[in-house]
Image (cartoon, rainbow, N blue to C red):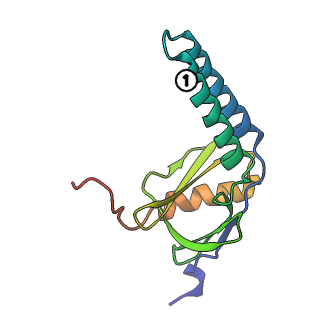
Amino acid sequence: MGSHRQTPPLLIRPRLSVRLAVFVTLTHAAAFAAALALPGAWRLLAVLVSLSLVYQVYVHVLRRAPWSIRTLIWQGDGSWSVQLVSGRETEARLSHSTFVSLPLVILNLRQGRLRRWSLPLFADALDQDQLRRLRQRLRIVGVGGKDEDAAPA
């Protein structure tokens, strides 16, 4: 009926987030300290926490991994287009586990049963107007569809 009801696509191109870097570093530092306090296999735990820190910084903070998300486009019809750092583009859908709050939005996207992406967006990763529009649209439109792996009611 009306073109006034059509939702324009929302382009999400996150930039480097200092808040995410600090959060990842502090949580891994706390886990590293806890691993050092444990008797026994603390060396193995410390190595695993260090590897996790390197992985998280590489994939989510710096977004250098080929499977890291470079750009998301939320189409007006509710579909999501994902462009990866490798240049590959694919379609995905928003998962029910997406988290929305004022300082942080975590977009969980899925493609089929096995392929999943998570994109944490602190307030400094997007400009304020874009983040506001994303949060507003997530709250109004919500997450459509049904997760395939959701527990039956």
Q: Left or right of 98: which side holds 57? A: right
Which of the two residues, 107 or 26, is positioned nearer the viewer here?
26
Q: Please tell me how crowded label 1 is: few (under 14), some (14-19), or many (20+) other residues with Cα within 10 Å.
A: few
Residue 100: percent from the left, percent from the top? 54, 48
Q: Position of residue 38 (x, y in %)?
A: 51, 11
Residue at the outermost left position: 153
Position of residue 13 relative to residue 102, above or below, is below
Which of the two residues, 29 or 48, is positioned nearer the viewer here? Answer: 48
Number of numbered discs overlaid on the protein picture? 1
Q: Which residue is mark 1?
A: 44
Mark 1 falls on what kind of element? helix
Viewer-closest of 37 and 83: 37
Work out whether residue 58 can be spotted: yes
| Amino acid beneath label 1 | Leu
Instruction: Identify which residue is drawn at 77% across, 39% down.
Output: 18
Task: Tell me which corner region of the image, top left, top right, bottom left or bottom right, holds residue 43.
Answer: top right
Q: Quadrant of residue 72?
A: bottom right
Q: Is residue 8 above or below residue 100?
A: below
Q: Residue at horizontal 67%, vertical 49%?
A: 59
In the rendered image, the quadrant that contains the C terminus is bottom left
User: Among all residues in the image, which is located at the extreme bottom?
Assistant: 1
x 59%, y 48%: residue? 105
Quarter occupied by residue 22: top right
Specify whether residue 122 is in view: no
